[in-house]
Amino acid sequence: MPRPPWVNQAPAATLGGTPQVRPHACLAYRGFCTVCSERCPVEGALLVELGRPRVIPEVCTRCGACVAACPAPINGFEVIPEEAPPPQKEAPRGR
Ligand code: SF4
Ligand code: SF4
């Protein structure tokens, strides 16, 4: 899915992957916390549904603000690495 145009104006990616909420670590699953959604600088990248945060990978710029701001004792985010590009095939050696 193509990214919306405003994404290009967002902070550059620093995470090297997409943050994904870990329900067992996220405080919003046991009580209340909205720190990550308040700190996310990209509109629509981190939604709160029924009080629980969810990252929208197609919108998220991987800036890392949410991961850095999370106050949970075990960080509420797991960073899912970007898919590695397929290995390049070696060109046949001619002789
Ligand atoms: S900041 Fe951390 S603990 Fe708080 S809602 Fe976001 S992921 Fe959960
Ligand atoms: S890394 Fe976190 S703070 Fe940054 S755009 Fe994605 S969801 Fe928002």
Image: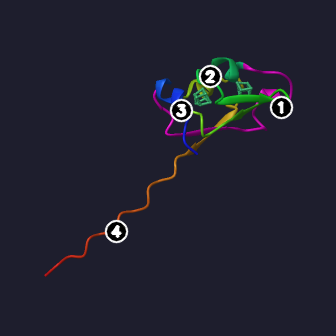
Mark-to-mark CA distance, 1 and 4? 46 Å
Region of the chain picked out in magenta, as a range? 12-34
For marks 1 and 2, give the one nearer the viewer.
2
Earlier sequence position, callout 1 versus callout 2? 1
Earlier sequence position, callout 1 versus callout 3? 1
Mark 4: which amino acid?
Answer: Lys
Q: How many numbered marks, from 0 up?
A: 4
Q: Mark 1 = which residue?
A: 29
Pick the front one: 59 or 83: 59
Earlier sequence position, callout 1 versus callout 4? 1
Label 3 beta carbon less than 8 Å to ligand 2: yes
Mark 3 neighbour class, 10 Å CA radius: few under 14, some 14 to 19, many 20 or more: many
What secondary structure is found at the residue carrying circle 3? loop
Q: Mark 3 = which residue?
A: 61
- In which quadrant is the N terminus drawn? top right
Tell me the chief SS of the magenta region: loop
Label 1 beta carbon less than 8 Å to ligand 1: yes
Q: Which mark is residue 40?
A: 2
Q: Mark 4 = which residue?
A: 89
Mark-to-mark CA distance, 4 and 2? 39 Å
Earlier sequence position, callout 4 versus callout 2? 2
For marks 1 and 3, give the one nearer the viewer.
3
Mark 3: which amino acid?
Answer: Thr
